[in-house]
Amino acid sequence: MTQKTISPIDGSVYVERELANAAAVEHALEKAVAAQKEWKKTTLAEREAICRKAVEYFLNNADEIGLELTWQMGRPVRYTANEIRRGFQERANYMISVAEKALADVEVDEIPGFKRFVKRDPLGVVFVVAPWNYPYLTSVNSVIPAIMSGNAVILKHAQQTALCAERYAAAFEYAGLPEGVFQYLHLSHDQVAQVIGDARVDYVAFTGSVEGGHAVQKAINARFIVGGLELGGKDPAYVRADANLADAVENLVDGSFFNSGQSCCGIERIYVHRDVYDEFIKGFEELTKTYVLGDPLDPETTLGPMVRTSAAAFAQKQIDDAVAQGANALIDPALFPAHQSGTPYLAPQVLVNVSHSMEIMTEETFAPVVGIMPVSSDEEAIQLMNDSQYGLTASIWTSDIDAALQIGEQVETGTWFMNRCDYLDPALAWTGVKNSGRGCTLSVVGYEALTRPKSFHLKIG
């Protein structure tokens, strides 16, 4: 059976790959188990040297990889290489740099005649299931620290970005990673469930939809293992009356529309204090109209197609339903000639006169669409931000750090930003609450899920 990557640029088949058969899956699992037993014996310095050389491969090939990304998922080529040069490199290098601290033995108080400590042992085989929207940024969060921890990794990348898995394999081959420590498989959904259910898999790192998270959890439930689940978001922003409006507008427009809004931590709903609401809306609308929707291979394009036509249709239906319920759409799609029904090309849209009775304010859209509501107080903003099944990130725009801290304590979210959004700091834990998932990647905390504690209790003499 084959899988095809249909490019959103022109509908052509960009990549076609055979799915792994049962024998290939079995071979990969056997190979991973055997390779990991030897890999866990290596020193941290040896692992670091190999992982840093793998990062070097990515940086050396960033432009070519960026062009592949544009063809696979549609992000404008002016941005795609930066996924490697900025976020990927930053996260990989940080997680490599903190591995020694994160993986150090846990010392306990000395008792005469005893040596006692807790060691952090690798789990074994880590199965990483990665998405297409930020294919390198999401996968690096687990792949690099898993290997640094002494685990073997099997990567299953999204059908839309199949070449990304192959790039990892090329990078680790270039770096001299022993064969079998990293492998990839092209798999169907049913095959993914089978691999998760296999006793040789010790941990699952999944990034994707809530629906996909439920499927992964169902596959895990028959076993005594856990999985890290980074799922969806409906991330809010709150603009207080004391905010720097120009800065808030610039960053929230970008946070709403970058990558065509296809970001789990992108801005999907904004609450603005009534005192500055009209001014904010004016600035937001004007800046949105400056985007250029079109061929992502054109360096002038700032907004590419969505990943597929059905995704654009889903977002357009949310827009149409909201308008039918009384919302006002501020952006005329005619300003964006590339916007065409029945294609993945969707104009950015700003909706006002919205409420939480509308799906556009409660269900994940994953598109260049944002709803904006006025609020009269911090308390109202907190209530609305928390009125969601999701809790990945949330942001506040204010000049009062004390207020930001106080409000942040009350908002149900994994990451709380002040005066920024849609960014992962690798020194901080990346996690979500409610239907945004479970578990943690990045930071020293991110290593905990990839190891198990092993206690040594040694009586001397």
Image (tube, rainbow, N blue to C red):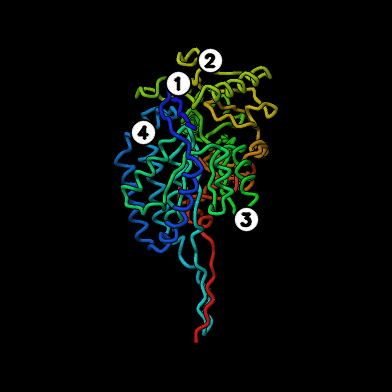
* SS of the residue under disc 1: loop
N-term mark: 3 or 4 = 4
N-term mark: 2 or 4 = 4
- State the residue position of label 4: 66
Which mark is in front, 2 or 1?
1
Q: Which mark is residue 11?
A: 1
Q: Position of residue 331 (x, y in %)?
A: 53, 18
Query: What is the C-alpha distance between the residues marked 2 and 4?
Result: 27 Å
In the image, taking residue 249 as reference, residue 375 lies left or right, namely: right
Residue at 57% over, 40% down: 231
- State the residue position of label 2: 341
N-term mark: 2 or 1 = 1
* SS of the residue under disc 3: loop
Residue at 50% over, 87% down: 461
Q: Position of residue 395 (x, y in %)?
A: 55, 39
Do callouts 2 and 3 mark residues in contact (Cβ within 8 Å)? no
Which mark is in front, 1 or 4?
1
Specify the amino acid type for callout 3.
Phe
In the picture shown, does residue 460 fall above or below 54?
below
